Image (tube, rainbow, N blue to C red):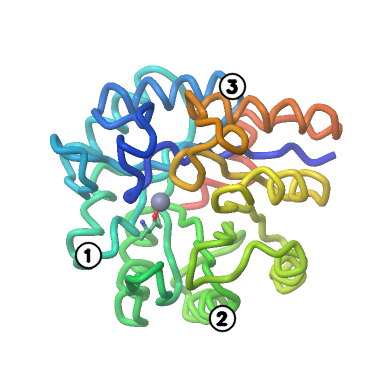
Amino acid sequence: MQPVMITAAMVGAEVTKVQQPYLPITPQEIIAAAVECYEAGAAIVHIHVRDAEGDATQDAYLFREVVEGIRARCDVITQVSTGGAVWMSADERLQSIECHPDMATLTTGTVNFGEAVFMNNRQLVETFARRLRDSGIVPEIEIFDVGMLDEAMRLHRMGLITDPIHFDFVMGVPGGIGADPAHLVHLVRCLPAGSTWSVAGMGRHQLTLATIALAIGGNVRVGFEDNIYYRKGQLARTNAELVARIARIAHELDRPVATPAEAREMLQLDRY
Ligand code: KMH
Ligand code: ZN
């Protein structure tokens, strides 16, 4: 069985301390959470940072502090967000890649995001893809709806993203594709040969979609960015708890948990 790559999305841009008191906010808290997730089985950490007030920011200095702090303690793959938060400009969002992370996210289209709009027009997407390619940073393509897959393949034809492509299906955001397992099966069927994929289910869909992904050969993203509960009515106390649960289920399904070194090979992070 193919090893499963587990991604920990520990912070996000939207969750607040009021909703989730255990949310890591400071650079030291985010670094500690990343190391705990790595120890629990995460191969990749998806990183957002917060300012002193706890609000989302794409501040280059904070990203550098977090990425360097993680690298000093373990070899987990560092993947920064270029999505940031819905109110941010394109230039602001791109600051996160200045610290030379291993990977960065790339969303290939605009999507309603609750009452807001997560803006990713073609010009922005092409600019981001070019900057990542020219910086030697491997993208994770964030798919919030089916048409974004077609847009990703257009970028591939333009030479802006290269094989093998790694996709993350973000399912259950209000305004994006629903968290229906039938949608997941369709998305997987649409993928180009040789690509890899993970699923990030929102809220209560995190565990169910993750388990389906484990069963059908995919990879998994969990963490407070997408879900703050361990089970209905019970907040998770750490991101690592959510990672550890996936590692246990993977074990039962005979899916080895990929180490960061194995994930680096699966994703061909040394391709540039
Ligand atoms: N916070 C969302 C608007 C990403 O990290 O690339 C965008 C997001 C996706 O979180
Ligand atoms: Zn994110």
Element assignment for label 3: helix
- The residue pinned by badge 3 equals 40
- Give x and y (percent) for residue 35: 45, 21
Contact between marks 2 and 3 (CB within 8 A): the answer is no
- Residue at (52% x, 71% y) in the render: 176
For label 1, the crowd category at 10 Å Cα-Cα, with few meaning under 14, some 14 to 19 and many 20 or more, is few
Hey, what amino acid is under mark 3? Ala
- Residue at (46% x, 39% y) in the render: 224
Real-space Cα distance between discs 1 and 2?
23 Å
Q: Specify the label residue 87 is tagged with.
A: 1
Q: Specify the label residue 255 is tagged with.
A: none
Hey, what amino acid is under mark 1? Trp
Q: What is the quadrant of residue 167 in the picture?
A: bottom right
- Relative to 202, say whether 154 is above or below: below
Q: Nearer the viewer, residue 40 or 126?
A: 40
Q: What is the quadrant of residue 150 in the picture?
A: bottom right
Real-space Cα distance between discs 2 and 3?
34 Å
- Give x and y (percent) for residue 240: 53, 25
Q: Nearer the viewer, residue 97 or 136?
A: 97
Q: Specify the label residue 147 is tagged with.
A: 2
- Residue at (66% x, 55% y) in the render: 196
Dividing the image into 4 quarters, which one contains the N terminus? top right
- Which callout, 3 or 1, points at the residue further toward the start of the chain? 3
